[in-house]
Image: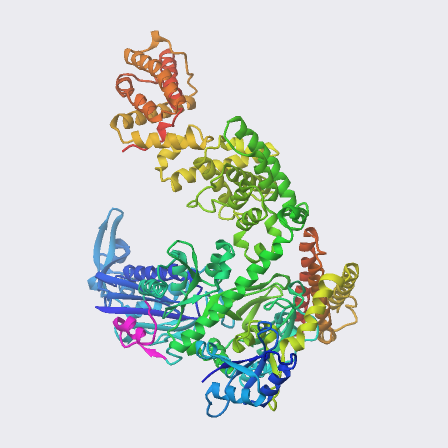
């Protein structure tokens, strides 16, 4: 039962170089048999590792499958004894990265959530997307879920650190107002992605969230699964400096972490992103994203041009400020000619959402400047204050607009 | 008599807040029942808590208050009855009191005669009172951080309230709190029991019923079972034991409803990382217990306390998961360690320009740690000169080097990751980078004592660095107008001052409080304020840390509060003698002397010279005794032989007693009065060098 590992040796004196194609060949044929890596094994000893995850039907004894393949391809095969029983495999039916997202999306869609697409402006966290930041304001109930790529330029590691990313993916969920059984629903969602809670240790440990530049905070927990933080769970209390009524619950699932946990891989880059159901061939997180991590680390730390970033910042800020001023000037400048209805109508159509995008641009530019080490101590507080003025300014105007 | 149970169920309460909330709920319920005369004699109160609930069980609640007779007072008799006939006033009062007019009585009081009515007040039932008053008690619980959750924001609480069980024996007490009606349905363990309600048949069966739903509600029992499980799991490693950590035991006790323990392993290659880093990762970040081998050194194992009870397969999965997380964190730490070594501490001084120490709001300037380091060095040089003069062995170059490098670890990746290890990391890096051991140790020790229970630095260099760093922080922030006020002390300046006092008290350093201030303050106003803070902290240290009686502390500090170790010696001597009868009498006399002198001052009486001709014989005796004793006491005082000095002072008793027996100090004759005042003034000033005895409280 369970997982086993085949290690293919190069035969002494045999031709080097083609074992990984042999291995892949086996993997593509075998039922639930996947090639893992050709690099991480000890050099000179082996070139390819195969792992077997029995899927459907009656599992056959692992070593039998292994040996029969070995005979077929005529290579020396060792069936590693240590792997099979030591860890009852959580991997057995582990979801791919994309399946994980599908499951979470359909789970919450079935519970009445709107599924949104990722917001197409750079943000540091799912909270900053307007689907959270602006929707939580005001009295209107809303339920939404979306996967948000979240950029933190300073966290980039050129793709060399197995646990840290410049851009990670948050599955962000807003339930406004929170249902009384929101925690139970959350636990169900974990079951839905294949986590059998009876075989894990789960704790809700206090962790309060805040985003000072957004005038936003809440209380809640980090959800710990076998010692790993997999979700940030927050009861949002304030946003844009305004008390929320009703409040909402915000669940932020760290997709990379959860996927690495489910698939039991040591590096984010080894996460299986997609698996071809016909051939079993896999595409990893590294295949999809490594290049991006590398290039953006290089850009963020080496190439981003500081004076130009400041220029962008100033120009986005100026536009956002002007927009906000114009919003507040509606009905002020030409008091005599405009009626109340005109003012309300004009306010409703005013592009505050665009002003918010400009504020987000500033926030991302600040993070870039920070990663470049270009923000001195003296400037820092001031710049954060400027961003806060924009973000909170938009939030206040937005609340006014909703009431118009 | 009944048993009363109240359980409130919540989303997981932060572990740090549970113990005090449990106690407070117990007290509030007990106080309510006492106030309302519902608590039977010998009633027993038990409290419980888990992350999801607080509960209190009171065995011995009366079903209802006893009926009580109440005396009501009405209008004056004269108004109520005219010629023995009741007036409308009497009728109205009788109606209001609910009695017949015929039942009204005459009350004779010092103020006159009034109409009285005796009314029987029926006792209210326990259920009635609890229904009415419990909501207020529950919602008044103190929480360090609150939240709103219901629309319209009607109340704030630590987390949303989910259920209430309120039972008198097996009857539900109809109470509603924050929109939740009480019932008899509790909840069990989230995973081991699931979502189905757990019916509590009777108050007394609470704990046992929940045990059936995989919840141990008794905190002491959970704590004990965690300790046992830790012991048991550790026994699988021969010779090993887990590292005692009381506060971590408390935390995990409040994070679990049904605890179990697993032992995990990590690659022993990580043991080359400093123990401080490994333990911080395990304890602070993962809430794991560290394991020591028989040699007392860290062993490659850890213990995790789980909130579940899994089967063998589950435990293997959980162990595997926890191990992976720990190894990833250790790998990070090792990576940071290696990266940090590429830039030695000495090359990091400039980058301290980018680390904020404090932003001055009024001037819109920012003080960086580079700026602070420069000022620290100046203070350290000043302190060093004082130590040098006193002839204490230390390495001044090492001190200055350590002060220059002390804050550079703030720019390292490892400290950014583990901020709680600042200083310690700097010290370890200094050592790894081949700096002098004295430099490394001083950097390592710079932040201790972190609390009043903590030790002071071992090395003189470490003590001096600790003093320089803290006094500089305190004076700089006072200069910036950030002195602590009331309960507000955002920069923990009181704690810094506590550490300064503690270092002076427990080291050999030759500094008074004023000396320390002298080397750091730039203006007189600030130096006065900082000295006042330090004196206030010395008072705290003597009273709360060293446990001297408050009157002893007041007496000692009134005679001098600058030299910390001298104040301690005086307080010890005073504590020793204060019980003796003679000394008590002398103290009382000193108090009297002070009062008389105060009166004299108020009346503008002059203090004259001690003219023997104007003195009574008892006064002359006292003068002689004082003149004889003064140099003796002064000499003993100079030699810090304070107990002997105080014993000598106590021998004044016969002379003082006789003086006050026979002499009227404030003699109507101004010449005699002046001489008397001169005498007592001399006695007071001559013997108040060690302590102001008038502060001593005598029986």
Q: Residue drawn 39% across and 42% down? A: B544
Q: Which residues are magenta?
A: B197-217
Residue sitting at the far bottom: A57
Quarter holding the C terminus of chain B is top left
Report if residue B658 lies within the magenta region: no
Regarding residue B650, the answer to whether it shows in the image is yes
Residue A216 percent location from the top left of the image: 59, 65
Residue sitting at the far front: A13
Total marks in image: 0
Residue B327 percent location from the top left of the image: 51, 65
Residue sitting at the far top: B613
| Color style of the picture | rainbow
Residue B610 percent location from the top left of the image: 38, 11
Residue B122: quarter of image: bottom left
Regarding residue A201, the answer to whether it shows in the image is no
Residue A225 percent location from the top left of the image: 48, 72
Quarter holding the N terminus of chain B is bottom left
Instruction: Out of B193 and A99, give the one closest to the viewer.
Output: A99
Instruction: Out of B304 and A22, give the one closest to the viewer.
Output: A22
| Figure check: B467 above or below A273 | above
Report if residue B204 lies within the magenta region: yes
């Amino acid at each position: 039962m369970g997982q086993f590992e085949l290690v293919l040796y190069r035969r002494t004196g045999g031709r080097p170089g083609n074992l990984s194609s042999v291995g892949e060949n086996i993997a593509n044929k075998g039922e639930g048999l996947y090639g893992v890596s050709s690099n991480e094994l000890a050099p000179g000893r082996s070139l390819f590792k195969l792992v077997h995850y029995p899927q459907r039907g009656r599992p056959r004894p692992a070593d039998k499958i292994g040996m029969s393949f070995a005979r077929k391809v005529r290579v020396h095969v060792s069936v590693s004894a240590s792997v099979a029983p030591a860890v009852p495999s959580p991997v057995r039916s582990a979801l791919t990265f994309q399946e994980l997202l599908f499951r979470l999306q359909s789970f919450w869609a079935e519970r009445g959530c709107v599924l949104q697409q990722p917001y197409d402006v750079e943000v540091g966290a799912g909270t900053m997307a307007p689907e959270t930041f602006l929707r939580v304001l005001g009295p209107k109930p809303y339920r939404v879920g979306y996967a948000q790529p979240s950029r933190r330029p300073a966290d980039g590691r050129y793709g060399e650190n197995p646990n840290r990313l410049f851009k990670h993916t948050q599955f962000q969920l807003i339930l406004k107002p929170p249902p009384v059984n929101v925690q139970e629903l959350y636990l169900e969602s974990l079951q839905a992605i294949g986590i059998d809670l009876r075989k894990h240790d789960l704790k809700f440990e206090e962790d309060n969230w805040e985003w000072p530049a957004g005038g936003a905070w809440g209380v809640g927990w980090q959800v710990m699964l076998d010692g790993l933080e997999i979700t940030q769970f927050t009861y949002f209390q304030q946003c844009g400096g305004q008390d929320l009524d009703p409040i909402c619950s915000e669940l932020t699932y760290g997709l990379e972490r959860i996927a690495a946990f489910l698939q039991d891989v040591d590096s984010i880059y080894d996460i299986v992103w997609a698996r071809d159901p016909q051939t079993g061939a896999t595409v990893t997180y590294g295949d999809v994203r490594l290049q991006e991590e590398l290039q953006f680390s290089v850009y963020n730390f080496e190439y981003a041009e500081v004076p130009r970033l400041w220029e962008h910042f100033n120009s986005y800020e100026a536009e956002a400020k002007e927009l906000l001023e114009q919003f507040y000037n509606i009905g002020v400048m030409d008091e005599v000619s405009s009626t109340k209805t005109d003012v309300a109508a004009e306010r409703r159509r005013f592009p505050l959402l665009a002003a918010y995008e400009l504020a987000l641009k500033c926030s991302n530019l600040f993070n870039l400047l920070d990663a470049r080490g270009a923000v001195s101590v003296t400037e820092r507080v001031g710049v954060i204050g400027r961003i806060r003025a924009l973000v909170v300014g938009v939030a206040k105007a937005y609340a006014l607009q909703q009431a118009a | 008599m009944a048993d009363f149970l109240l359980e409130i169920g919540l989303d997981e309460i932060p572990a740090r807040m549970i113990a005090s909330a449990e106690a407070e709920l117990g007290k509030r319920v007990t106080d309510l029942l006492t106030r309302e005369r519902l608590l039977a004699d010998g009633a027993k109160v038990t409290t419980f808590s888990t992350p999801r609930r607080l509960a209190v069980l009171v065995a011995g609640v009366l079903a209802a208050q006893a009926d009580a007779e109440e005396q009501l007072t009405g209008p004056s008799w004269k108004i109520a009855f005219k010629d023995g006939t009741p007036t409308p006033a009497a009728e109205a009062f009788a109606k209001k009191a609910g009695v017949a007019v015929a039942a009204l009585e005459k009350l004779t009081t010092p103020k006159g005669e009034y109409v009285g009515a005796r009314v029987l007040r029926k006792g209210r039932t326990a259920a009635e009172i609890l229904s009415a008053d419990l909501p207020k008690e529950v919602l008044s619980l103190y929480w360090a951080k609150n939240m709103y959750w219901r629309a319209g924001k009607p109340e704030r609480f630590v987390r949303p309230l989910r259920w209430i069980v309120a039972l008198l024996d097996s009857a539900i007490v109809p109470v509603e709190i924050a929109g939740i009606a009480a019932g008899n349905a509790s909840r069990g363990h989230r995973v081991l029991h699931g979502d189905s309600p757990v019916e509590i048949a009777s108050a007394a069966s609470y704990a046992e019923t929940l045990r059936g739903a995989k919840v141990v509600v008794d905190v002491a029992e959970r704590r004990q079972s965690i300790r046992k499980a830790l012991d048991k799991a550790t026994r699988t490693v021969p010779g090993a034991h887990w590292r005692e950590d009381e506060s971590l035991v408390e935390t995990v006790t409040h994070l679990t409803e049904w605890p179990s323990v697993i032992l995990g392993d990590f690659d022993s290659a990580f043991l080359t990382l400093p123990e401080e880093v490994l333990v911080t990762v395990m304890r602070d970040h993962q809430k794991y217990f560290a394991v020591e081998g028989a040699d007392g050194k860290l062993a490659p194992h850890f213990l995790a306390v789980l909130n579940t009870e899994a089967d063998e397969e589950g435990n293997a999965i959980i162990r595997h998961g926890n191990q992976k997380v720990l190894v990833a964190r250790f790998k990070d730490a090792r990576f940071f360690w290696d990266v940090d070594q590429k830039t030695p501490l000495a090359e990091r001084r400039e980058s301290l320009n980018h680390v904020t120490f404090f932003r001055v709001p009024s001037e819109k300037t920012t003080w960086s740690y580079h700026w602070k380091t420069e000022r620290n060095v100046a203070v350290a040089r000043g302190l060093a000169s004082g130590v040098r003069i006193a002839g204490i062995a230390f390495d001044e170059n090492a001190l200055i080097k350590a002060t220059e490098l002390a804050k550079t670890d703030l720019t390292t990746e490892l400290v950014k990751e583990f901020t709680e290890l600042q200083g310690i990391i700097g010290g370890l890096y200094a050592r790894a980078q081949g700096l002098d051991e004295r430099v490394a140790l001083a950097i390592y020790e710079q932040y201790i004592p972190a609390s009043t229970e903590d030790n002071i630095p071992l090395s003189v260099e470490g003590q001096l660095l600790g003093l320089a760093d803290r006094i500089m922080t305190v004076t700089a922030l006072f200069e910036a107008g950030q002195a602590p006020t009331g309960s507000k002390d955002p920069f923990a300046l009181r704690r810094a001052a506590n550490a300064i006092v503690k270092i002076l008290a427990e080291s050999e350093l030759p500094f008074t409080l004023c000396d320390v201030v002298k080397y750091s303050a730039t203006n007189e106003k600030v130096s006065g304020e900082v000295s006042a803070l330090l004196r206030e902290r010395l008072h705290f240290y003597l009273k709360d840390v060293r446990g001297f009686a408050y009157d002893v502390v007041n007496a000692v500090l009134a005679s001098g509060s600058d030299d910390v170790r001298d104040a301690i010696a005086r307080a010890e001597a005073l504590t020793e003698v204060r019980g003796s009868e003679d000394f008590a009498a002398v103290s009382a006399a000193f108090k009297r002397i002070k009062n008389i002198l105060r009166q004299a001052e108020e009346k503008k009486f002059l203090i004259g010279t001690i003219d023997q001709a104007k003195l009574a014989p008892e006064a002359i005796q006292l003068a002689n005794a004082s003149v004889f004793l003064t140099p003796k006491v002064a000499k003993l005082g100079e030699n810090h032989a304070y107990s002997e000095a105080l014993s000598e002072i106590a021998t004044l008793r016969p002379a003082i007693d006789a003086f006050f027996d026979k002499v009227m100090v404030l003699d109507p004759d101004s010449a005699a009065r002046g001489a008397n005042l001169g005498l007592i003034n001399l006695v007071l000033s001559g013997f108040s060098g060690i302590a102001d005895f008038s502060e001593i409280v005598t029986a």
